[in-house]
Image (tube, helix red, strand yellow):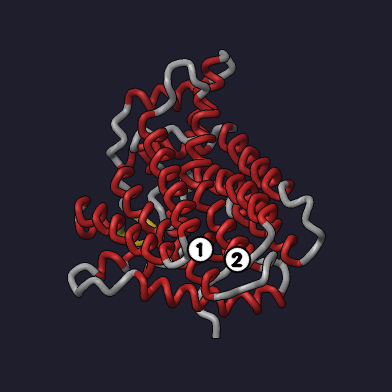
Amino acid sequence: MTTTPMLPLGDEALEERLHPVLDHVEHELREAVVGADRLVDPATAHLAAAGGKRLRPLLTLLAAELGGGQNEQVRAAAVAVELTHLATLYHDDVMDSATMRRGAPTAHEVWGNSVAILTGDLLFARASRIIASLGAEAVRVHAETFERLCLGQLHETMGPVDGEDAVAHYLQVLADKTGSLIATSARYGATFSDAPPEIARMLMRYGQKVGVAFQLADDVIDLSDDSATTGKTPGTDLREGVDTMPVLLLRQRQATGALDASGVAVLDRLRAEELSSEETLRSLVADLRAHEVVAEARSLAERWAHDAVAELDPLPESSVKDAFTAFARLLVDRLA
């Protein structure tokens, strides 16, 4: 019996082949997040136990289908990329002062900032230990990905330099902060299943664009009024002063003199109001959600997903290629 939720890939036989492997990866992941001691284990297991879509491990397994299929190295890489992702979430939630993640209180809400940060560090270390078992090249790729994750977070925190296009800056942040690990997930699956190098490079380009599409979709979901479904606190980015794509599109329109009165009012409120109040934050989220820039951000997410799928044009038609298309579409269809 399968236990791990999996995105529908459009082919029953493929899903039946991959699902037990994903279950195995989930089991190994749950083993990897414990084992320090009784004091630390509740914190390290907190986010893994809260669930998640396991997109990165699934992409690793799917990529392996373009090579020799599933094996021990592919499964180990799938565990490592999800551990790395979980580690970033501990850090992100501290930086964003988020109170909810996956429908549960964030780690820093339960144990405090210091424990949450150190827990993220510990999970990075465990991911690195697994990657080290896969060879020097895998270690190099993991280090480069980790560097891009950090650069993406730094550039988001510091913002664009004077004269830099803010939308272009933000898209690069998303490529680094989200796209890099998704690209690496696909790369590992291809590499450790002995797929040709050109397939690995193709999947990296696909993965990076899928990552940008995914995060643009999250920017819209962050404005959702249904936190029970999203598992996140609506408007977290607004409260922390992070300009996600809808706000950047408002500012872009304002700079060209094309912003309407309702958009001006939203930007004025962002500048003038203290958003620590939940009531004020909900009101501002509702005003922004009603503006047409949200639909524009949604369209941008769909365009990046389309461009990701276009990277796979050289592949022959197959159920696996169709599954990559379904994977990209489903990340954006979360907006429906």
Residue projecting furthest to the right: 317
Residue projecting furthest to the top: 257
**Does residue 203 appear left or right of residue 5 in this picture?**
right
The crowd level at tag 2 (other Cα within 10 Å; few <14, some 14-19, many 20+) is some
Q: Position of residue 300 (x, y in %)?
A: 63, 38
Mark 1, residue position:
53
Residue projecting furthest to the front: 136
Q: Secondary structure at mark 2?
A: loop
The crowd level at tag 1 (other Cα within 10 Å; few <14, some 14-19, many 20+) is few
Amino acid of disc 2: Leu
Residue 75 versus residue 143: which sits nearer the camera? 143
Q: Position of residue 325 (x, y in %)?
A: 70, 56
Q: Position of residue 66 (x, y in %)?
A: 69, 64
Q: Is residue 175 visible?
A: yes
Q: Is residue 313 above or below residue 192?
A: above
Mark 2, residue position:
7
Find out whether the residues at labels 2 and 1 contact each other: C-beta distance under 8 Å.
yes
Q: Earlier in the sequence, mark 2 or mark 1?
A: 2
Q: Position of residue 179 (x, y in %)?
A: 53, 46
The tag on residue 214 is none
